[in-house]
Amino acid sequence: MSDELKQDAVQTNEDNKVLSKHDLHRAAVRWAFMACNAFNYETQEAPGLTWALAPALRKIYPNDDDYEKAIANHLKYFNTTTAMANVVMGATTAMEEKEGTKSIGAVQSLKTSLMGPLAGIGDTLIWVLWPTIMGSISGYMAVKGNPLGAMIWFLCNLAFFFVKIKLTDVGYFSGTKLITSLGDRISIFTESASIMGLTVVGALIASVVRIQSPISFRFGAVSMALQSGILDKIMPSLLSVLLTWLVYKLIGSKRWTMNRIILFLIAISMIGAFFGILK
């Protein structure tokens, strides 16, 4: 967060400051452990968010009637990437701390307007790229018998926990201003991370997905192996790429679940090995 944004936010909230950093971080920790645990199809993440914010709202609204209005407002529909919700939490608490019940309508409008764009950013970076890149690297090291794979994954998630706590501060001090001022740079970063993620996944396909054919053709005294003589000449790891493409297509099909795809791969592997087609 830039110094300019932080100074603006401090000036905005300093007159009616009720919450401390401890209150914000407490809300962030409560959200980290609740998040989707209270998920329902009517209000989705709203119950978890309300539970996380309840102690902070109690400090902002010492009057019971105002507190109940704020609680009822936060129980309305809310859904975004859980980590990015920390930004919304920080921004809404800053608004309610400054304006009290006058901001209830604006708070709901802010949540509605932010949860979509933040979900777009969060789903790309956190749900897709983060586990794809770090999970793949850690998983590959673990497959090779390197215990650092598990340790790296654990440490990455531990560090990410503190990042989510920090995002609450970012939302509190800058709110929507951060999203608008950094919008272009976030898009560039998202695109760069997507390219890096695809590069990592492409490299892992060739090294982790192992499928070869032991079939060989004999023409008189001449013998030619299908794998080394033909397929590898066309493109190394061609079968691995084709298998990955097939699984990708099956995942996109509504008739195939992940369990069904796994059973299908096991069956193909066993049948292929039994008849000497695959190894």
Image: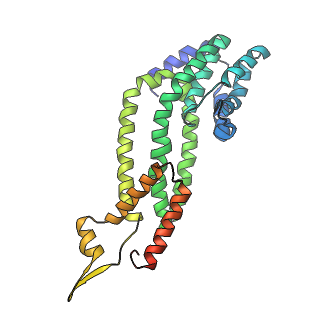
Q: Residue at x 46, y 71 (%)?
A: 269
Q: Residue at x 54, y 34 (%)?
A: 84
Question: Can residue 19 be seen from the camera position used here?
Answer: no
Can you name the residue that lies furthest to the bottom here?
A: 221
- Tell me: residue 49, above or below residue 198: above
Number of marks in picture: 0
Question: Can residue 269 be seen from the camera position used here?
Answer: yes
Q: Nearer the viewer, residue 244 or 84?
A: 244
Q: Is residue 10 left or right of residue 234?
A: right
Q: Position of residue 11 (x, y in %)?
A: 54, 14
Q: Position of residue 232 (x, y in %)?
A: 27, 69
Where on the picture, by quarter, is residue 66? top right
- Tell me: residue 11, above or below residue 264: above
Q: Is residue 230 left or right of residue 4?
A: left
Instruction: Specify the quadrant that holds the C terminus.
Output: bottom left
Q: Residue at x 45, y 57 (%)?
A: 137
**Protein image colouring:** rainbow
Where on the picture, by quarter, is residue 33? top right
Can you name the residue that lies furthest to the front here?
A: 255
Q: Position of residue 221 (x, y in %)?
A: 20, 89
- Tell me: residue 243, above or below residue 277: above
Q: Residue at x 68, y 40 (%)?
A: 37
Can you name the residue that lies furthest to the right here?
A: 64
- Tell me: residue 105, above or below residue 215: above
Q: Position of residue 252 (x, y in %)?
A: 45, 48
